[in-house]
Amino acid sequence: MESPTLLAQTAQPRYPNGERKLARSAFMQATWGLLVLAAIAQLLLLVWLDIL
């Protein structure tokens, strides 16, 4: 007999429109914002060092 996985057991909290509640979390938005800023900074450094 197979046991269900942890993800199958744990339902994700969602708003009535189907959006995940974690999507509106300030912590998650800040985390994604920092990730985007780091990616842009890396691209700028790559271009700047290539020109240098």
Image (cartoon, rainbow, N blue to C red):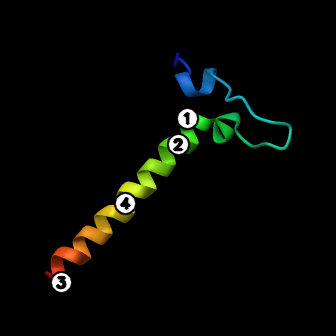
Alpha-carbon span between mark 2 and mark 3: 31 Å
Query: For numbered disc 4, what is the local secondary structure?
Result: helix
Q: Earlier in the sequence, mark 4 or mark 3?
A: 4
Measured in 3D between alpha carbons, the distance from the residue under mark 3 to the one under mark 1, in whole angstroms, is 36 Å
Seen from the viewer's position, the closer of residues 9 and 27 is 27
According to the picture, the residue beneath numbered tag 2 turns out to be 30
Report which residue position mark 1 lands on: 27
User: Percent x, y for residue 50?
Assistant: 17, 79
Classed neighbour count for the residue bearing mark 4: other residues with Cα under 10 Å, few (<14), some (14–19), many (≥20): few
Label 2 close to label 3 by CB (< 8 Å): no
The one nearer the camera, 1 or 47, is 47
Task: Name, please, the residue furthest toward the left.
Answer: 52
> Crowding near pointer 2: few (<14 within 10 Å), some, many (20+)?
few
Dividing the picture into quarters, in which one does residue 42 lie? bottom left
The answer to which of marks 3 and 1 sits earlier in the sequence is 1
Q: Nearer the viewer, residue 2 or 10?
A: 10
